[in-house]
Structures are given as structure tokens and as C-alpha cells.
Amino acid sequence: MKNFEISVLDLAPVKQGKSIHDTFQDSLSLANHTESLNYKRFWLAEHHNMESIASSATSVLIGFIANGTKTIRVGSGGIMLPNHSSLVIAEQFGTLESLFPGRIDLGLGRAPGTDGLTAQALGRNPAIINQQFPRQILELQTYFSKENSDALVRAIPGEGLDIPLYMLGSSTDSAWLAAELGLPYAFAGHFAPEQMEMAFKIYREHFQPSQQLDQPYIMACVNGIAAETSEEAHKMSTTLFQAFINIVRNDRKPFAPPVDDMDDIWSPMEKSMVLQKLRYTFIGDQAEVEEKMRDFQEKFNVDELIINSHIYDHQKRLRSYEIFREAANSLSKA
């Protein structure tokens, strides 16, 4: 089993009884804490029209987190590129990289990060997404290149800066594109695990070296909830389960505190649906999450594990990331 990096995915989760200002302060606190624990990167994800997630203005929030930290890489996991002009994203991330040199990542996805009506309000045209998305990635690479200095349209700031691009996926579609373009590939195993194994296989087998990357680099996002005891971790996980039930019921309200018994909330069918979507959720004490991380790595052999953690109590969320750091350190010494 090869060693792997660990990183953070934060959706800026809004909790019941808390303000969005509180949410952002908690995100910064988490970034500072995981930086001190030597996590590799802290990514924020673009979502819209959800009371439970406050990371809609992703580039702005990345700037806030990067300004409040010193060494950890900060970036998007991801920017939903068809929601935006390629030039605007090049300028925004060029600005971020100019402010925080060597610390900014640009992860890119094609999904809307929202419902259909909101996607329409964002100006997306679903009929051309599959052609638009690859073209926009090439546009970004052009805007960031030194060679674009003679073009009529230029990204300033952005031009000539080394801003690494990452391809995000929740199906096999982006695996083909990431392999073709020679970009690092991150899979959303925290909510869409069904095609992850096949996506990694496609990416590895079809990878073409690029100027950015000479060999495949695979990142997997999973849910992680760790505590001092298994019982505490499983109770904490009911916040995550309730959040997914809300998605099933199309009720995107703020995250709820944990409950004693999920069977009072979900039906057997809902339970089955949620647990299927959350099959790569590492819940338990340190020994348990260490075993689950080892099993996962032996199966998928990833370069980086990105941990998403929906825990209602902020101090317990900080402690959870400590436990995952300790588990990863233990595995690296094995």
C-alpha cells in the first residue's frame, strides 16, 4: 500500500441556529487547524440555492481562507466552469494566485452544483455543456499561458501564472477528459460512489502526459467522521444522514444536530438510498477509521484522500480531523 496525502473539502455548511457569518468563521478555523496538522490542501465547492451550503461565491471565499492561513494550499473543489465565463475565472484565480503565490488550486467540474431552475438562472445551456466544458478548459490554459500575451483578449492578472488545474468528476465522463488532457483527477466518492472504480481505471489506462503532469494523479473524496469512541462517531454521523435525507426530499435546510435514532426520521427505502450513496463514509474511532482508510487504499491506490466532514459541533469537527491525521500517520509508518 503506497502512502497518500490527506486534504480537506469544505462546503461551508450552514447549521441550524447559526448565521452564515458563523459558517465562514468556522471554515477559517478549520483551515487554520488542518494547516497546523499538515493537511495538503483546503478546497471549497461551488453550490447554489441551498440554505445548507454557503460556498456559492467560491472564489471570494477562497480569498478569505487563503488570507487567514499561511502554508496550506487553498482552492476550488470545484468551480463549476459552465456556470461562468472562462475569462472571468482566469482573472479571479489569477488575482488569487497573485495575492497568495504558490498556494492556489483550480479544480473544475461540469455539473451545475444546483437545481435545474437555478442552473438556468446561472446562464447554463445544457444542450452544449459536453462541448462547452472541454473548450473552456483549453481556454483557461490559453489565458494562463505566457504565449497569450500577443492575443487580443488576455487575462490580467492570470497570464503567465502557474495555476494547477484539477479535473473533478462524479461519473466516468470526466475521467476520459482528465486522461486526455493529462490533468490530476478527483472523484466525488462522498456522494456519487457508483462509478468511482471504473473512472479510476479509465483514467489510469488512458492517461496522456502533459506539461502539468507526467503520470496519473488520483484524488478521492470521502466522508469522514471520527471521535474518541465508535458510539460517539456514529451519533455524530446522523447530521450527515439527515442532510442526505433532506436532499432526497428536496428540502435543503440547514444542517441539523445529531439524533439518537435515525429510524425515527428515515423510512427503510430512504435509509437504503442514503447508505448506498454514503458507502465511502469512514465513521468510528481512530482504529476503525484507520482500518477503513487502509482497506480503501488497498482497493483504489489513490495519491490523495480528500476528507469531507459534516459534523454539527465545531470542536468535534476539529477533533475529527485530528484523528484522521493520526490515523494517516499511523498507516504511513506501517
Image (cartoon, helix red, strand yellow):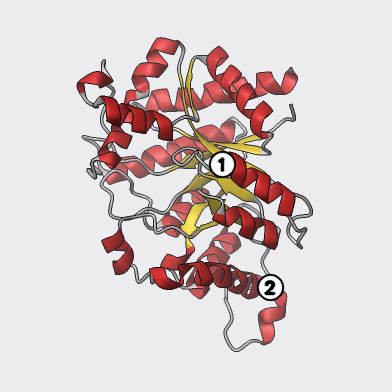
Q: Quadrant of the N terminus?
A: top right
Q: Is residue 131 visible?
A: yes
Separation (CA) of disc 2 from disc 1: 32 Å
What type is the residue that disc 1 sits on?
Answer: Met
Task: Give the vertical position of 95 relative to 241 (above or below).
Answer: below
Q: Secondary structure at mark 2?
A: loop
**Which label number is shown at residue 73?**
none
Please provide percent x and percent y for residue 64.
45, 51
Compared across the picture, whether 30 is left or right of 3 comes to left
Q: Residues within 10 Å of mark 2 (few under 14, many from 20)?
A: some
Q: Residue at x 65, y 34 (%)?
A: 300
Lower position in the chain sequence, tag 2 or tag 1: 2
Please provide percent x and percent y for residue 228.
46, 12
* Picture quadrant where residue 196 is located: top right
Q: Residues within 10 Å of mark 1 (few under 14, many from 20)?
A: many
Q: Viewer-proximal residue, 205 or 290?
A: 205
Q: Secondary structure at mark 1?
A: helix
Please provide percent x and percent y for residue 87.
52, 75
Residue that label 2 marks: 145
**Which label number is shown at residue 196?**
1
Please provide percent x and percent y for residue 173.
55, 56
What type is the residue that disc 2 sits on?
Answer: Ser
Q: Residue at x 29, y 43 (%)?
A: 52
